[in-house]
Image (cartoon, coloured by chain):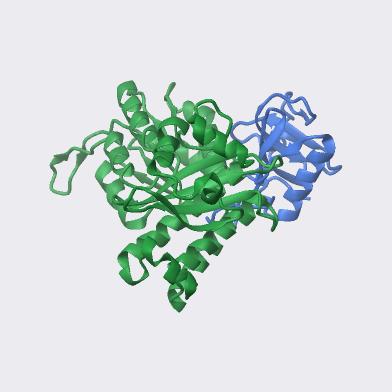
Chain colours: A blue, B green
Amino acid sequence: MKSPLDSRRYDPDPRSREIEPGIADGVYVFVQDENGSIFVLPDGAHLHPKVLGGAQPAMYAGDLTIERGRVQDLTNLSGTFQFSDAEGLLAVASALELKGFRIMPGAVRLFSHVDSSWPVVLR
Amino acid sequence: MRIVILEDNPDRRAAMSDVLADLFPRAVVEYFAVARRMIEHLDSTGLYDVALISLDNDLDMVTSDDGRLVDPGDGIEVAKWLITRPPVVPVLVHTTNTMAGDQIDELLGSNGWSHSRVIPYDGESWIPEVWRSTVRTLIVTHAPDATVSSIGVTILKHGLQFGLPLEVMLEDILRVGALHSRGDEAVEDFSFELAYLSGSDVLASIVSVGKPLLADIGFGATKEVVDLSISCLGIGPVASDNDSVEPMFRRLLVENGIREIQFEIVQPKPGHQAVLLTGNRSNQLDLISPGIQANIRAVKSLLELALVIAIREPQNDIDVNRRSELLSE
């Protein structure tokens, strides 16, 4: 679990909800809570701390793109949480598959929070 | 990973920096207020570690060291320079100058560059609202796989160090891309192939990974195949049963179980042209997926780099006539 770098206790954004199949196409920021549930908000600047709100810690965070119901990309991009472990991102991918989402080949991309190298495609 | 931006407005720069610090905190961000300086910088540092270029068009005059006003050039000038290079970086055009934006789009689009456009509005509001999301999508979609890039560079370094035939290096680079795109070691249904136009306008296969494409669709295919890819198929993957594919070519693809095909022109410099063919026979894969597209671009960049080295070092040059000689070594 990791606490947000921005520790202000924001109210949760009212649009925040657990991801489910049938969600509209688009880019979303996501935060996985301590129970493993994945909550999303339509993409926007500095939204990660408002997904769960209250400066709650997260199991993982990043963003993803849904296109025709499929996960086109899934990343660890979050300036607020900056998760860098591949296992956590792969676990998010598996959790999404359990929910019924198809993960496209090459979609899971781990960006470095250590240096400016290219992302690693995990699967 | 660098992000290179032509933008002279300090407020816009500050807003862009805020957005990028949150989105890609480790990316190196480089700003330029003069088109020529940006071109000189990119010319000396190369494009292979650039994740995104963002271009404004109209720039304010700048004052030189001796107090003279100097014309800073514009985004069109940068676009004209970019199209003399391999299209390996996505470009985001952010200008309120509609005519100039259209011209840049036309220049980039007709030369195979991936590009998007955002139109500024309301001070700097557009930067977190629309520029940010476009930057995110372009970089996530286009950034090559670090694994493919780093292994490919290692292959090149070792190959040069030990004097391996360039053909061997090229095949290894293709293999890395194919394996990563396929996701496992069974690449039979996913082909990467590098081909050259020989002097007689015959498309000759140099190296390939997976089940060869050219051998199946007719070894000795002519330059028309390449021309078709550009005029009819365009840039990017195409379903083999697409109506825009020339009927004879379509029949050959379908007969050989090729579901999708993609041609990429690998052109390290004018007059030196090769073709990277990607073919997909699998029902489990879609060439259009961001990961595969990123790998194709990574492999293409590495091939271009290898061919630049070959051109500079004639002893390593690939001549179609030397193909059998190289293979027998």
Expressed as whole percent of the image width and height from the top left, the position of residue B215 reads 53, 51
Q: Is residue B198 left or right of residue B257?
A: left
Front-most of residues B254 and A122 = B254
Q: Is residue A113 above or below residue B67?
A: below
Expressed as whole percent of the image width and height from the top left, the position of residue B186 reads 69, 56
Expressed as whole percent of the image width and height from the top left, the position of residue B65 reads 17, 49
Q: What residue is rendered at 53% in x and 57% in y?
A: B208
Q: Is residue A118 left or right of residue B304?
A: right
Q: What residue is rendered at 59% in x and 50% in y?
A: B191
Front-most of residues A5 and B107 = B107
Q: Is residue B144 left or right of residue B106?
A: right
Q: Is residue B144 visible in this depiction of the protein?
A: no
Q: How many marks?
A: 0
Expressed as whole percent of the image width and height from the top left, the position of residue B327 reads 48, 69
Front-most of residues A10 and B51 = B51
Q: Is residue B280 visible in this depiction of the protein?
A: yes
Q: What residue is rendered at 76% in x and 44% in y?
A: A93
Q: Is residue B238 above or below residue A23?
A: below
Residue lying farthest to the right in this orientation: A35
Q: What residue is rendered at 28% in x and 39% in y?
A: B80
Residue lying farthest to the bottom in this orientation: B162
